[in-house]
Image: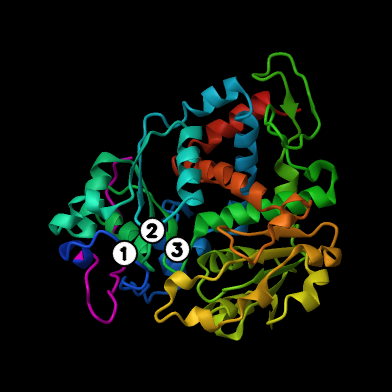
Amino acid sequence: MDSVGPGWGSSVRVGPADVPFSSFAAKGETTMSPTDTVLMTPPTTDSAHRVAALNRNDKPFHVVLAQQFDRNTIEQLCQLADMIRSIGGSRQGTQFLRTMLSHRRAMLYFIQPSTRTFLSFTASCQIVGMPYNEVRDRSTSSEVKGESEDDTIRTFSQYFDLIIMRHPAEGFAEHVANMLNESTRAIPVINAGSGKDQHPTQALLDIYTLMRSFGEESGGESRAPAEPGAVGEPRTSVRAISGSPNGTRAIQPGARFHRNLFAGKTIAFVGDLKRGRTVRSLTYLLCRYPGVRLVFVSPPELRIGEDILDYVSRHGIEFEISDDVRSQLGEFDAVYMTRMQDEWDLNGESKSIAYDRYAINYEMAREFKPNLVIMHPLPRRHELDPRLDALPQARYWQQVRNGMWMRAAIIASLFNVDTAIRDHYYAYYTY
């Protein structure tokens, strides 16, 4: 993957205090809270130039911004994720997938707390056979000796072929991608969550979950292929074929992803929308689908940012701002719940917000549409009643599992082994 960066990217200005990212290590601090971090100001160039700096040959080289993904790329990744989950359902298929990237290595640089995203990426690396290492605590790195964070990451780039990073500073993943573009060894960067700004791989797994859910609703060939051998998951129709690696072949997954399953659907985002990066990134992706209607339900203090509303308007997507989830619940085809993001508080201001009004409980289930899709990026608090878990509308646990397959698809695509996976799938797993 050694390559000379093409010189893309723009300089990234550090916040008003001009405090470098290495300042925390220089002070000997081993932990960083969001309120301690100086947020990086995103580049002032327009989105098209920012996307161009992150892509090569009209496809993502880094995965940093949700705006990098057009509708065709989204659908190709969803299809590939379905193929990987089908192939990975057998011992032979799993062994095949593990040959794909056994010659590459990944670094997971997670200095912001994470459970699902971290484990999802480790599982994804394992699926495609990519060995990985991790740094989750700055106290174990040379940053405590005063090394700049840029130098730490440049060091990673000499040992590894991919950097997957979660960082509390907005814009830092983009800064790293641009920095590596200009280095003598440009390697891909995956943004696994940056400040309050972006979480593109979460958005991709979210739209994958919505597509699978809406595809099941529409029935027919749009149903998702099964994971042969998976325990406790519904299976679609498969039939035995002599010579196939696992004795079965699945229905081809393509048709579902090449139709606009979002036209006529109303999708609600509920909760702390001002500071929720998952909502921002998923909104960018949903704007690729004409005919979808978005409802942003939140306390007035936590409304979605004007930059997102401007983006939605420019793409001709119908939207509504609301502060009442109960009165419209029966209209929604999907509800994306979020917790209070109070880790970003400056002075405990979240305590004064009546967040209980932005919760869904079991008693509200009578108002659900039969095919409602309830999602949550997790972790949850009191905004989502655990008694809802057993209902068919609850899709947040499937959402977690979908992330593993989607992230495996993203990694496979970045390293151009997606064609080999597709060829294998069509040779052995379809009829």
Q: Is residue 157 left or right of residue 189?
A: left
Q: Residue furthest top?
A: 242
Inspect the magenta stretch and tell me whether residue 389 lies in it. Answer: no
Give the residue type at disc 1. Met
State if disc 1 and disc 2 touch (CB < 8 Å). yes
- Report helix, strand or loop for mark 3: helix
Taking the spot 47% from the left edge, 82% from the top edge, the residue there is 349
Report x, y in % for residue 195.
Answer: 41, 67
| As drawn, 235 above or below 120 | above
Q: Position of residue 28 (x, y in %)?
A: 18, 62
**Residue placed most toward the observer, 181 or 109:** 109
Q: Nearer the viewer, residue 272 or 83?
A: 272
Q: Residue at x 60, y 42 (%)?
A: 81
Q: Which residue, given by chain and number where applicable, does mark 1 sit on?
A: 32
Of the two numbered discs 2 and 1 on the same chain, state the one appearing first in sequence.
1
Magenta-tinted stretch:
1-22
In the image, what residue type sits under mark 2?
Gln
Between discs 1 and 3, the one toward the N terminus = 1
| Element type at mark 2 | loop
Q: Is residue 43 left or right of residue 128?
A: left
Q: Nearer the viewer, residue 305 or 101?
A: 305
Quadrant containing the C terminus in the rendered view: top right
Magenta highlight on residue 19: yes
From the image, tell me which residue sits under label 2: 112
Q: Which residue is mark 3?
A: 51
